[in-house]
Amino acid sequence: MAHFDEKAKPFSNQWMNDRLAVDTVKKVLSTEYWIPKNINFLWAMGMILAATFGLLIVSGIFLVMYYQPDTKTAFDSVNYTIMTEVGYGWLWRHIHGVAASVVFLIIYIHMFTGIYYGSYKKGREMIWLTGMLLFVLFSAEAFSGYMLPWGQMSYWAGMVITNLFGGFTKDFLGGIGNIQALVEWIRGDYVPGQAFLSRFFMLHVFLLPLVIMGVIVLHFAALRIPHVNNQDGEEVDFEKSARLYKEGNKKESEVIPFNPVFLSKDIFVMGIYFVLFFYLVFYHFEFAMDPVNFDPADGLKTPAHIYPEWYFLWSYEILRPFPFNVGLVAFGFAQVAFFLLPFLDRSPNVAPANRRGLFGIWFWLMLIDMIVLTIMGKLPPEGVWNVIGFVAALTFIILFILLPFITKTEKKA
Ligand code: HEM
């Protein structure tokens, strides 16, 4: 050990620095973690996501104290015990349900901010890839949570989604062995039952949250070296600007420290977000709950329409308008397409989409297309809705195929 002050009092600043480098860690992660000045409120979405995830964990801990992962008692433990018997149980459930839905809205805003400003390239690829991994993990977390109340939609959505794996082995692996084998292995039974509920319970309350926490750390670590992008796509000289800031030339410097300067702005935006969030929790929680799921699971009664929660509708609509095996390929394509974005975008320019010619048009078409897919995914697949859904699904695929070509022709800014 280079410097070790034996006279330092236990737990004094010096004593802690000698053992844990507390001051250095504080500088690296907070007071000398430099953020460009020219960024807007959209850059607060990451911290809002982290805070909402925190709220999901806290409310989840309270719910799991009374929830029973048993097919005979799960439905009542949620709809009766938690909602009516446990003091403020309804409040924790509403917070958990609203947060689970709203977190996806924020994830989509965060993703599309990244796409609009080109924050996934030039050294920021790992931020994007870990972000996409978080998207997949959050999707799995939401799906597994949806199984737990063991209502009609839990049961039938569980049935439909696990069936997709059967289609995959049957149509693409040449029906290796018994085509139902993979589906049964995932379910632990022929149909969703106790084994299914137990394993999704384990995934939801233990394994997935643990992995999500690890990947959030990785996502933050991936941000540390390239730093966050800014709203002009300007290449900031962080070392020079940090020096200027520390010398007191704050006006000339292009950066501010994360703590306390940028954090105060994050907290301001977060304050507005939480006012809206708790408005939903107290007055409009029903939007986050499917009425069909207030009927207990019944394996003999299929609901008239089975559809996923709003945040999965766009990818569901890419699956639905095609024949089953073509739909599966399209669905698989949609899942990986966003992961590949940093490599499909061939332009070296990091700039807002509206300054990138054809890419600007691509961006808005993609956003509108995903909204159309989401709306169509909720409507029954009949008549004109089916046609619009089909065109929107094709448009999604074509847009991704075109991306490398249109970005390759983009002039270097
Ligand atoms: C769900 C949990 C997530 C958390 C807690 C999280 C957190 C953060 C934070 C705190 C930042 C820095 C500030 C900001 O730009 O907002 C950030 C940046 C970023 N995140 Fe996420 N994020 C999450 C998911 C995602 C997803 C799903 C994507 C999309 C693939 C993504 C892509 C990015 C990108 C590209 C940046 C860099 C932005 C820039 O450089 O301007 N993140 N994230």
Image (spheres, grey):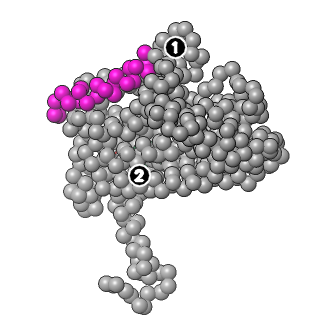
Magenta-drawn segment? 391-413
Q: Is residue 121 magenta?
A: no
Q: In percent of the image, x 67 and y 31: which residue is there? A: 156
Question: Which residue is farthest bottom?
Answer: 7
Of helix, strand and loop, which one carries label 1? helix
The stretch drawn in magenta includes residue 410: yes
Percent coordinates x, y for residue 138 in the rendering? 52, 43
Q: Residue at x 68, y 37 (%)?
A: 191
Look at the numbered disc 2 and give the secondary structure of its residue: helix
Q: Is mark 2 within 8 Å of ligand 1?
A: yes
For residue 386, the mark is 1
Q: Main secondary structure of the magenta part?
A: helix
Between label 2 and label 1, give the one nearer the viewer.
1
Q: Which residue is mark 2?
A: 219
Q: Closer to the camera, 209 or 98?
A: 209
Residue placed furthest toward the right: 85
Q: Quadrant of the N terminus?
A: bottom left
Mark 2 and 1 residues: CB-CB less than 8 Å, in contact?
Answer: no
Q: Is residue 220 visible?
A: yes
Q: Left of 95 or right of it: where is 298?
A: right
> How many residues crowd around disc 2 within 10 Å: few (fewer than 14), some, or many (20 or more)?
many
Alpha-carbon span between mark 2 and mark 1: 39 Å
